[in-house]
Image (cartoon, rainbow, N blue to C red):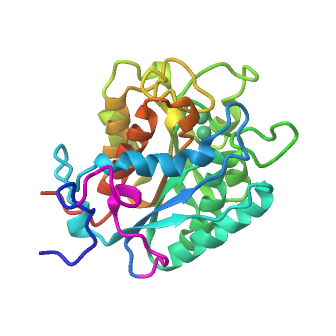
């Protein structure tokens, strides 16, 4: 009998009842004493096209009500292993991207100081930058596994340095990443210029375009990722638009020809063994997700991320 927090069972309260925390976990107000926490960032001021990811955290929590504690595919038993809770949402300033960055960094500094690993529900991809700032301050320059249709390394967008297509350019400039330990998986779509991917490659990034991994298992790729990254503190940033819009169309900047859902699961499950210090799942946009499939997939991927955190027992 464990004394750790458990998701509220569907046999105690109907799944469609109760307050919608992530996986029906207890809500917490402090990261102290937690090994991992789900945190929402209802921020979409950095979005370049379809807006609405501010409603992502709430919808992911709603769809997470169907998730049960044990991972029947991998054997992971996260709630027997870790103390986990839902820390609620970060109170971003929806009128100011710059102020929101500082608010998020301060929130996550507290989380990392407490020894808690954050699993973030986005929000648009801009939020990866302030999380990486807080993470690198605590852990030093990080390795990064980044799943996305887009490289998100633009210098500016509409003349602005902070937007959902710029976080990893800023992260490199600020020394938050170890360039040779960065993997960008699933990139595709049309480019601003023919040399769009030259800059990240010049920083040492490994780029895996979607068309190079069509129809393939990603287990060999993830073996390579683990070999290169080793035990370097690593962040996993997962933009749901890395997955094909046939499966995850509820997002702001969809691109055809993306990852399948099994490939996405292989990537996340393949992160087991990495020293993951935090993860995010961003760009779920409920207003373009009428059936809830994208949010449901996002909820499942966040659960899979929890399952591969260091210290999770597999049965
Ligand atoms: Mn992105
Ligand atoms: Mn993207």
Instruction: Provide the residue span drawn in magenta.
Output: 13-32
Answer with left or right where residue 219 lies relative to residue 75: right
Q: Position of 214 compared to 165: left or right?
A: left
Residue 155 visible? The answer is yes
In front of the other: 57 or 74: 57
Q: Is residue 45 above or below residue 216?
A: below
Q: Is residue 170 magenta?
A: no
Residue at (33% x, 22% y) in the render:
216
Quadrant of the rendering where the C terminus is positioned: bottom left
What is the x, y in percent for residue 38?
A: 44, 61
Q: Quadrant of ligand 1?
A: top right
Task: Please give the count of numbered marks on the rendered protein.
Answer: 0
Q: Quadrant of residue 48?
A: top right
Instruction: Find residue 141 and report its horizontal and vertical position in percent.
Output: 58, 62
Taking 201 as reference, is 273 above or below it?
below
Q: Which residue is found at the position 49% from the left and 29% from the top?
A: 290
Residue 181 seen in render: no
Residue situated in front as seen by the camera: 20 or 131:
20
Question: Residue placed at 20% from the left, 61% from the top?
Answer: 12
In this image, 23 relative to 162: left or right?
left
Which quadrant of the rendered structure holds the N terminus? bottom left
Q: Quadrant for residue 252, please give it.
A: top right
User: In this view, which residue lies farthest toward the right?
Assistant: 159
Q: Is residue 17 magenta?
A: yes
The image quadrant that residue 251 belongs to is top right
Q: Where residue 41 appears, x then y in whole percent?
A: 59, 56
Q: Position of residue 191 (x, y in %)?
A: 70, 22
99 or 177, which is in the foreground? Answer: 99
Residue at 65%, 63% (x, y): give it. Answer: 133
**201 sits left or right of 185 in the view:** right
Magenta stretch prevailing secondary structure? loop
């Amino acid at each position: 009998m464990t004394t750790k927090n458990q998701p509220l069972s569907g046999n105690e309260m109907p799944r469609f009842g109760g307050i919608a925390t992530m996986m029906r976990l207890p809500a917490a107000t402090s990261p102290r004493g937690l090994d991992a926490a789900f945190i929402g960032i209802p921020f979409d001021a950095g979005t370049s096209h379809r807006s609405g990811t501010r409603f992502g955290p709430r919808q992911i929590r709603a769809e997470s009500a169907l998730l049960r504690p044990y991972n029947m595919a991998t054997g992971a038993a996260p709630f027997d292993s870790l103390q986990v809770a839902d820390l609620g949402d970060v109170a971003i300033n929806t009128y100011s991207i710059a102020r929101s960055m500082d608010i998020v960094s301060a929130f996550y500094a507290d989380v990392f100081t407490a020894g808690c690993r954050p699993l973030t529900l986005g929000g648009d991809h801009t939020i990866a930058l302030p999380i990486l700032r807080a993470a690198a301050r605590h852990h030093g320059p990080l390795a990064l596994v980044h799943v996305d249709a887009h490289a998100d390394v633009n210098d500016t967008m509409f003349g602005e340095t902070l937007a959902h297509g710029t976080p990893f350019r800023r992260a490199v400039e600020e020394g938050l990443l170890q360039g040779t330990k960065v993997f960008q998986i699933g990139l595709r779509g049309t480019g601003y210029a023919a040399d769009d991917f030259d800059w990240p490659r010049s920083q040492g990034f490994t780029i895996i375009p979607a068309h190079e991994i069509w129809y393939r298992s990603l287990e060999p790729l993830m073996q390579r990722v683990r070999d290169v990254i080793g035990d370097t503190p690593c962040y996993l940033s997962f933009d749901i638009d890395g997955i094909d819009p046939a499966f995850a169309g509820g997002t702001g900047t969809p691109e055809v020809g993306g990852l399948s859902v099994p490939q996405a699961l292989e990537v996340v499950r393949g992160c087991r063994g990495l020293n993951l210090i935090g993860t995010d799942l961003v760009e779920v946009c409920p207003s373009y997700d009428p059936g809830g499939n994208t949010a449901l997939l996002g909820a499942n991927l966040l659960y899979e991320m929890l399952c591969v955190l260091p210290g999770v027992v597999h049965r």
